[in-house]
Image (cartoon, coloured by chain):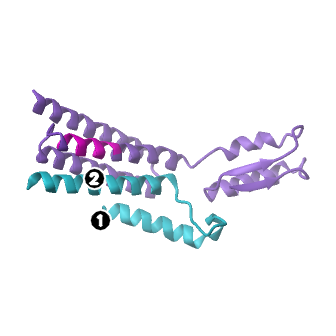
């Protein structure tokens, strides 16, 4: 899967912040992502699918 | 969710407000538990305040994802060419890059500009579909 560099940086920065702040972790040991990070992951999946569809259509 | 129990803090409005503010800064939703007759719930409205950058940017990113889904569908149906789809991919990539920069810089006007750019990407896609279907 390919994602944009700016998206990778944004996700990396958020995960770093969240891991550094244990107060943001839930009792089950999970970390809740912000709405922006969740949307970025959703978009990254859509982007990857679109890229695959373009490659397939171009063949 | 962080719960602030204010039952014993009827007159400590400043303390409760400060706790809500600090939790809000950490991006946490806050539940204030207080007696119904206290004035504490006034501060609860503060707890609903979310980061305006997050609230502005997330819907735009979701809209970009939808534009990408629409582009994929249109391409599969033959309503647009692979070149049109590439244009849409390029356009939406630009919006996401701008949004990531705006979120990092906490720049609300730039998020609004990126939102308009997303609208332009959608308009471009619709234009390509119309041209193809004619």
Disc 2 sits on a residue from what chain? Answer: B
- Residues at marks 1 and 2 on the same chain: no
Residue A15, numbered circle:
none
Prevailing SS of the magenta stretch? helix
Q: Helix, strand, or loop for circle 2?
A: helix
Q: Give the image quarter of residue B113.
A: top left
In front: A9, or A37?
A: A37
Can you name the residue that lies furthest to the top here?
B134
Colour of chain A in the image: cyan
Q: CA distance from mark 1 to mark 2?
A: 15 Å
Where residue B11 appears, as percent x and y from the top left, is 90, 48
Residue B134's image quarter? Answer: top left
In the image, what residue occupies the spot 30% across and 42% down?
B67
Range of magenta residues:
B66-75
Residue B110 visible in rendering: no
Which chain hosts label 1? A
Q: Secondary structure at mark 1?
A: loop
From the image, tell me which residue sits under label 2. B93
Quarter residue A19 falls in: bottom right
Q: Residues within 10 Å of mark 1 (few under 14, many from 20)?
A: few
In the rendered image, which residue does mark 1 sit on?
Answer: A1
Question: Against A49, is B76 above or below?
Answer: above
Q: Is B7 on the left-hand or right-hand side of A24? A: right
Q: Which chain is purple?
A: B
Q: Is B80 inside the magenta-drawn segment?
A: no
Left or right position of B104 against B32: left
């Amino acid at each position: 899967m390919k994602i944009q560099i700016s998206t990778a940086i944004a996700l990396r920065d958020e995960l770093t912040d969240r891991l550094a702040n244990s107060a943001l972790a839930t009792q089950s040991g999970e970390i809740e992502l912000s709405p922006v990070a969740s949307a970025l992951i959703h978009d990254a999946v859509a982007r990857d699918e679109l890229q695959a569809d373009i490659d397939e259509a171009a063949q | 969710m962080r719960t602030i129990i204010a039952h014993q803090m009827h007159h400590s409005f400043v303390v409760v407000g400060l706790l809500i503010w600090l939790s809000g800064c950490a991006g946490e939703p806050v539940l204030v538990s207080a007696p119904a007759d206290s004035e504490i719930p006034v501060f609860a409205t503060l707890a609903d305040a979310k980061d305006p950058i997050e609230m502005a940017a997330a819907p735009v990113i979701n809209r970009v994802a939808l534009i990408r889904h629409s582009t994929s569908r249109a391409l599969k149906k033959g309503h647009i060419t692979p070149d049109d789809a590439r244009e849409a991919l390029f356009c939406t990539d630009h919006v996401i890059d701008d949004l990531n920069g705006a979120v990092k810089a906490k720049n609300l006007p730039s998020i609004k500009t990126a939102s308009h750019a997303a609208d332009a990407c959608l308009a471009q896609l619709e234009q390509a579909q119309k041209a193809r279907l004619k």
